[in-house]
Image: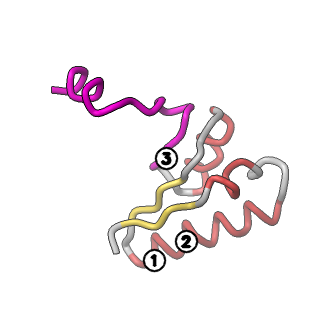
Amino acid sequence: MTEIKIDRTFVSELAKRPSKRVIVQAIIDLGTALGTTVVAEGVETEAQRAMLSEMGCPVGQGYFLGRPVDAETFASNHI
């Protein structure tokens, strides 16, 4: 296993629902204990990014971090 992903439904409600924070923290702790990268999906705000970082999840995906692009655009900007 190379990574564990936290579903966007948990990330979107991090600030509003304490139960989601408990679940996300448990996923992060499990991934850390296993030596596996934990990736949060659906990061759309700075607040979500900061909260996840404080919880120990430094890797994320989502519109806040970067919009999806097609392969040609990606290649022209990153090669």
Q: Is residue 56 above or below residue 51?
A: below
Indicate whether residue 68 is drawn in magenta: yes
Residue 42 left/right relative to 13: left
Answer yes or no: do the residues labelled 1 and 2 have beta carbons within 8 Å?
yes
Number of marks drawn: 3
Whichever of callouts 3 and 1 sits on the residue coming sooner in the sequence is 1
Q: Give amino acid for label 1.
A: Ala
Residue shown at 55% from the left, 51% from the top = 41
Q: Position of residue 6 (x, y in %)?
A: 57, 61
Image quadrant assignment for residue 33 = bottom left
Residue under pointer 2 = 29
Disc 3 residue crowd, few under 14, some 14–19, many 20+, Cα 10 Å: many
Nearest to viewer (mark 3 / mark 1): 3
Q: CA distance from mark 1 to mark 2?
A: 6 Å
Image quadrant assignment for residue 20 = bottom right
Residue under pointer 1 = 33
Residue under pointer 3 = 60
Q: Position of residue 32 (x, y in %)?
A: 46, 70
Q: Is residue 40 above or below residue 74?
A: below
Residue placed most toward the observer, 31 or 2: 2
Residue shown at 54% from the left, 53% from the top = 40
Q: CA distance from mark 3 to mark 1?
A: 19 Å
Disc 1 residue crowd, few under 14, some 14–19, many 20+, Cα 10 Å: few
Residue shown at 40% from the left, 63% from the top = 37
Q: Give amino acid for label 3.
A: Gly
Indicate whether residue 35 is drawn in magenta: no
Disc 2 residue crowd, few under 14, some 14–19, many 20+, Cα 10 Å: some
Q: Does dot 2 land on a helix, a strand or a loop?
A: helix
Tell me which segment is drawn in magenta: 59-79
